Image (cartoon, grey):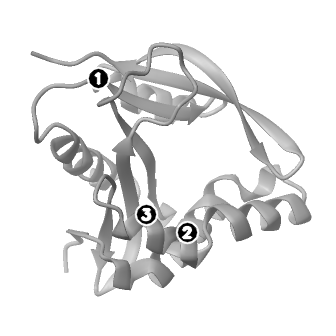
Amino acid sequence: MSPTIRRATVDDAATLSSLAGATFVEAFGHLYPPEDLQAFLDDAYAEAKQAVILGHPDYAVWFLEADGRAVGHCAAGPCGLPHVDVQPGDGELKRLYVLREFQNGGWGSKLFETAEAWLLEDGPRTLWIGVWSENPGAQRFYARYGFTKVGTYDFPVGRVIDLEFILRRPALA
């Protein structure tokens, strides 16, 4: 059965919490001391936080599902990145993760395009993304969609501070 994409609801908070943690660990878990990783996961992906996001009208989350199991997700909403040029009304792709076994099938692109369409429902606007400085694959992926690096910021995972790139795509007419 081919994977499908569906918008998540508040009832999906536990699933989102679990999947967000699993995909982060799969992608980046090896980079951090266990106690720092666990502290980050417990905070960033807590079920209660996911329920707030899922219930907020300015945010949206989608699942990639295969055989009834969530295997990827993306989240979008108002831009919260620390850049001087961020304006009210700008949108941000907050997260985009797909479990390794479902990567390289175009599903990351489909998730991104779903979030992009939602972000642009009310017309053109500037879009933003934060991406780890040491993830050239993600940087190339977003460059294909017209995003360019315009800044950096620190992203804490416990006591470890990662350098993140801020990517922006101006509003397309």
Comes first in the chain, label 2 or label 1: 2
Instruction: Name the element at disc 1.
Output: loop
| Screen quadrant of the N terminus | bottom left
Residue hosting label 1: 126
Residue hosting label 2: 49
Residue 92 in picture, x, y percent from top left: 38, 37
Left or right: residue 1 compared with residue 72: left
Distance of mark 2 from mark 3, alpha carbons?
6 Å
Left or right: residue 130 compared with residue 41: left
In this rendering, the answer to whether 147 lies above or below 76 is above
Residue 143 in picture, x, y percent from top left: 37, 22
Instruction: Name the element at disc 2.
Output: helix
The one of 21 and 45 positioned closer to us in this rendering: 45
**Hey, what amino acid is under mark 3?**
Ile
Report if residue 33 is visible in the image: yes
Q: Are marks 2 and 3 in contact (CB under 8 Å)?
A: yes
Mark 1 burial class by Cα count in 10 Å: few <14, some 14-19, many 20+: some
**Hey, what amino acid is under mark 2?**
Lys
Res. 59 mark? none
Q: In the rendered image, which quarter is residue 163 located in? A: top right
| Screen quadrant of the C terminus | top left
Distance of mark 1 from mark 3, alpha carbons?
21 Å
Mark 2 burial class by Cα count in 10 Å: few <14, some 14-19, many 20+: some
Comes first in the chain, label 1 or label 3: 3
In this rendering, the answer to whether 43 lies above or below 75 is below
Res. 53 mark? 3
Left or right: residue 168 compared with residue 137: left
Residue 145 in picture, x, y percent from top left: 28, 26
In this rendering, the answer to whether 114 lies above or below 154 is below
The one of 90 and 3 positioned closer to us in this rendering: 90
Distance of mark 2 from mark 1, alpha carbons?
26 Å
Q: In the rendered image, which quarter is residue 75 located in? A: bottom left
